[in-house]
Amino acid sequence: HRLVPRGELRAADLDDAFTLHQYLAREADVFKAVRDEVETPASAASAPHLANRYQSASISSPRRATRDWNRTFELRPAAVRGGALLIHGLTDSPYSMRAIAERLRAQGYYALALRMPGHGTVPGALTQATAEDWMAAVRIGARHVRRTIGADGPLILVGYSNGGALVVRYALEAAADSRLAAPSRLVLISPMIGVSPLARIARVISALGPLPFFEKARWLEIVPEYNPFKYNSFPANAANQSYRVSSMLRAEVAAAAQSGRISRLPPILAFQSVVDATVSTAAVVHDLFDQLRGNDNELVVFDINRRARLEPYIRPADAALVSSLAAGGPRRYRRTVITNLSAEVSEVRARSVAPGATTAEDVPLSLAWPAQVFSLSHVALPFAIDDPVYGSGPPESPTPSIALGRLSPRGEKAVLTVPVETLMRIGWNPFLPFMLDRIVEWTGEQDRP
């Protein structure tokens, strides 16, 4: 938690001449510093911990995977028809972009999942990372993908959580600056358009960190690091920077809507759970989609499981938001709600309202809510049921890693070393097949005559 790896990339480093090759070289240096200063001493400890991601023998070690998915990765198709830059979320890593990247590669897209500065190494790295570092990295990635696929191929930007806010900000920049590689389309997963009130408080808390006797004020939470591809501990600076990103984005969207420049944005497809403890679903609806122009945007919202009969315990504002999207007045964008066929069954449908329309069209999906699951979560959307770490049914492996998605703890309170609600939060998406199919269909629409 105290280590800030030497050589981590900063916005001042990432000028217009900086290449992905240089980016990867600096990234390698950062990971070597973590290996030398954290992993090697931890692995030599006389009492290894079963779930310490920084010990090589641990079931939480990312080295158990075929590659270290904490690092930037590229996926190349046999024949390139387009390119995709994929940006992960806060405290996250490129691993969360794997399923979408692999599906896009199967469709002929060169996929670059770029590690944002401060991520994938040690949580202390996020005590100094800034929104400017991340935006500069996105520019590097977009420029590289454009050069890789040529001038004419479609360029897709995919952003998850904080990455969703970053790619929208980049698209607004590119719409105003012809020197930047302009994206053809955006795909947003749980985009961080608005954040929880805790992020606002973090601005004050993080200011205390540099003061003597206030070192712990750098952190909103410090817990064991058992997750191989995501930090569990949360620096106050990270929350502060995400608040800055979302605040700047909302102001930029509002200004672009007022001036009319927002019509220059490429089409946007977004996926969001109606209940989300990390970002504001209402902000996604009102502060982004309601501001867009054109009728080629789509917002997909995952409802709660109506068969779980938990409506009395759901916040009224969330329930009202779903109702307004499923029906309500006409909007300039398509809105689709994934909800139960009825309150008596677990099977779901896509209830979709076309731009400018008020009548919904229902399409059964041949997918269903799993037993004992009442909703999705912010962290669940990009992961499959068979994801080795976050899925509930991971495949057999000769070197099994920690299977967080299979945990459903019930027992005594105050016994576990991590908050029990963290372990109970669903980490995979039962409707991922629909989401991937819709991404492929939607990105393919730009190639139609």
Image (cartoon, rainbow, N blue to C red):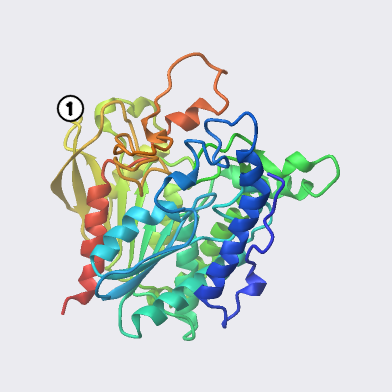
Q: Position of residue 325 (x, y in %)?
A: 30, 49
For the N terminus, give its image quadrant: top right
Does any portion of residue 128 appear in the rendered image?
yes
Residue for point 29% across, 39% down: 395
Determine which residue is flagged by label 1. 344
Q: Nearer the viewer, residue 63 or 96?
A: 63
Residue for point 34% across, 79% down: 149
Q: Position of residue 384 (x, y in %)?
A: 30, 44
Q: Nearer the viewer, residue 18 or 264?
A: 18
Q: Nearer the viewer, residue 179 or 51?
A: 51
Above or below for 154 versus 430: below
**Which quadrant of the view contains residue 247?**
bottom right
Side of 295 where 122 appears, left or right: right
Kind of residue at badge 1? Glu
Kind of element beneath mark 1: loop
Residue for point 24% across, 75% down: 79
Above or below for 115 versus 311: below
**Which quadrant of the view contains residue 348?**
top left
Q: Residue furthest right?
A: 212
For the C terminus, give its image quadrant: bottom left
Q: Position of residue 186 (x, y in %)?
A: 36, 66
Side of 38 where 81 appears, left or right: left
